[in-house]
Image (cartoon, rainbow, N blue to C red):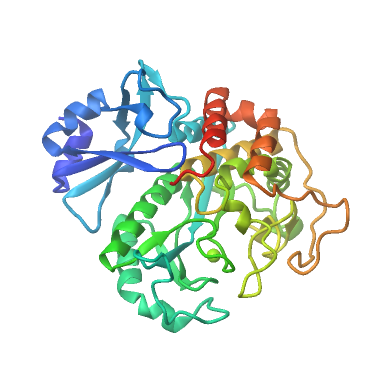
Amino acid sequence: MSDLAHVAAQRGLRHLLFSFSDLFGVQRAKLVPLSAVAELAANGAGFAGFAAWLRLTPADPDVLARPDPTSLMVLPWEPQVGWVATDLEMGGRPLEQAPRRVLQRQLARAEALDLRFRTGVEAEFFLLDPLDGGIADRLDSQTKPCYDQLALMRRFPLIRELIEAMESLGWGPYQADHEDANGQFELNWTFADALITADRHAFFRVMAAALAERHGCAVSFDPKPIAGLTGNGAHLHLSLWRGERNLFHDPNGELGLSTIAYHALGGLLEHAPALCALTNPVPASYRRLGAASTSSGASWSPGWVSYGGNNRTHLVRIPDGQRLELRLADGAANPYLLQAAVLAAVLDGIERQLDPGPRSDRNLHAEPPPPGSARALPASLDEALAAFSADSRLNSALGEEFCSAYRELLARYPGRDG
Ligand SMILES: [Mg+2]
């Protein structure tokens, strides 16, 4: 019996979801009964690759999904079922465009430099009426609804379930709130190594949707579910570590950050327009990015390639001397490609010792940057795709097999779901 089958049996599981995330972030799976887990873990579960967003054809052989036993999670709402992330291969070799593989390649580059990439993600979401797509709670109507205590507590039965689910999974959830749009919420769990965060982010999207359904709600992670309201970000907090030491922290550095942190920041700024193709991958992403304002008074999303201190109007915020917060990505970003693209930009910044230039303390929501001082972010998915295609360093870091597959799918299916 394989390790995975043994552990699954010990934990009382009867079925495992062999799961993977395709290039557009759709979570795909096969349900495997415990009696077949050992065999399918050894040989891989077969998928017709063309049926998912992987840029394969109906003539291609089976994609085989092999589970990573370290990723096993028990569905808190269905305790006889486990979820396990899989790594994809085809024809006896890894499928290089598989998003988890794309992230693993960047993590290997970091590891070769003795660097450990640790991240936390803020997966904002809306709770909508599944029938008409409106805000599920019609009483949730404040003009500035952020931190609305009553609206938060009207959703307590669901929020509590999600928090307790994350506790049972060992994620270390530590806060939940009503966010800046009517019907919008955010639950935070503790940062971790990037692959763990990506697996959790992927699982959270499934879990939030599954639990919300039980409470009569639909979940939306879309970048702009409702015109005029703040959209769903997926802010990424990031730092690089060597063993247990945070290399971003330097008590003598500007705002408590080290030289390596500023080089990482330089990489993020240099590649930001190209990153948008991965962090903001649908047309609606550009109705969030650079939005003039919303009914609450702010869009909370960046429009320019800039950074500030503890200032939420910039692309990158420096909340403290431990980390950077990239405020670019939205809820349509693939959890694995988000981290892979950001790490590729960070490593390029470090390798080339890029200088992020001076910080801006301006309120960019009120006043644009001085002319010529900051590039504008792409205004459309087409512009982002052009920036991505033109960024040869980012393409070669992420791998041509992945980049060509991704560019082609994005150009052919810009308005797809998922
Ligand atoms: Mg938020």
Up-down: is 90 above or below 337?
Answer: above
Question: Quadrant location of the N terminus?
Answer: top left
**Residue 324 seen in this snapshot:** no
Give whichever of 293, 87 is nearer the camera: 293
Up-down: is 198 above or below 294?
Answer: above
The residue furthest front is 132
Q: Taking 92 as reference, is 186 left or right?
A: right
The residue furthest right is 371
Question: Residue visible at 18% across and 33% down?
Answer: 37
Give whichever of 227, 388 is nearer the camera: 227
Q: Taking 90 as reference, is 326 left or right?
A: right
Q: Quadrant of ligand 1?
A: bottom right
Question: Residue visible at 80% across and 66% down?
Answer: 367
Question: Residue visible at 29% across and 57% down?
Answer: 210
Q: Position of residue 138 (x, y in %)?
A: 41, 79
Q: Position of residue 168 (x, y in %)?
A: 28, 59
**Residue 279 seen in this snapshot:** yes
Write down the quadrant of residue 86 in the picture: top left
Q: Position of residue 239 (x, y in %)?
A: 59, 49
**Count of picture labels:** 0
Question: Residue visible at 31% across and 25% down?
Answer: 64
Write down the quadrant of residue 110 in the picture: top right
Write down the quadrant of residue 407 in the picture: top right
Q: Position of residue 126 (x, y in %)?
A: 45, 65
Give whichever of 40, 304 is nearer the camera: 304
The residue furthest left is 35
Q: Taking 4 as reference, is 197 left or right?
A: right
Up-down: is 205 above or below 216?
Answer: above
